[in-house]
Amino acid sequence: MKPLLTILLTFILSGACIFQDYKVQRENMVSQQIEARGIDHKATLAAMRKVERHLFVPPEVRKFSYDDTALPIGLGQTISQPFIVATMTQLLNPQPSDRVLEIGTGSGYQAAVLAGIVKEVYTIEIVTELGERSKELLERQGYRNVKVIIGDGYKGLKEKAPFDGIIVTAAPEEIPPPLIEQLKEGGRMVIPVGAPRAVQTLMLVEKRKGKIVKKHVTEVRFVPFTREKQ
């Protein structure tokens, strides 16, 4: 039988190797999947180098954490591929003083990336179990500037509006009017729009002098936008 000290050292060294491996994978993810494809927003790149994506996915798919792909997180939901997270974050152009609203907490990964850049993140999740799980995970990792709310994201969060930025991680067929209303003058919203289970359009929406300016960015696939029963 191995001495206890030897077993403990083996366990500690094994954990350190896994941690280092994830760190290397994360750096490769940023350099090969994100920077190489044109993302150059420094704060976005720094946040994605720091946030440990493997902690936001189930153990059974953890080995794919830093691959260029979306992954299932249970309850019919997914975590977006890293390049899409980076693209949406860069489009939002988040600043350190910003207050951002996210619709669709999901695993909490996008909220964690934003939390590393902005002052406050409010994130709404309609699936209670998923929202509670992400809230616990974010708190356990020390994200004190993220507030997770269980509810219908279509309504936004009027009591905390207006927001410098709004990011939506599920696809409605049309942009919810309350979200446009809650966007600050000069603010930006990044949102996928389109029919469920079809190719959707990622859109950048800006409020300029009271006018709404929309720009089609790229084609994407997101889970459908879910609402409370009316």
Image (cartoon, grey):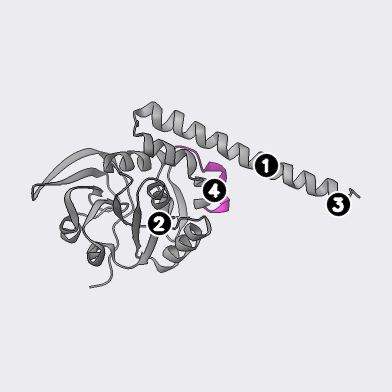
Q: At which x and y percent is residue 168?
A: 29, 52
Q: Is residue 218 magenta?
A: no
Which-is-in-front pick, marks 3 and 4? 3
Task: Give the image location of residue 207, x and y in percent.
Answer: 14, 48
* Circle 4: residue type: Val
Spatial CA span between label 3 and label 4: 32 Å
Q: Is residue 109 left or right of residue 9?
A: left
* Residue carrying label 4: 61
Q: Which residues are magenta?
A: 57-68
- Cα distance between the residues tagged 4 and 2: 28 Å
The three-letter code of the residue at mark 1 reads Ala
Asked if marks 3 and 2 touch (Cβ < 8 Å), the reply is: no
Going from N to C along the chain, the mark reached first, 3 or 4, is 3
* SS at circle 3: helix
Vertical comparison of 25 with 129: above or below: above
Residue most toward the top?
Answer: 36
Residue at the extreme front: 97
Residue of label 1: 16
Left or right: 191 with respect to 27?
Answer: left
Of mark 4 and mark 1, the one earlier in the sequence is 1
| The C terminus, quarter of image | bottom left
Considering only order in the chain, which callout, 2 or 4, is on the residue closer to the N terminus? Answer: 4
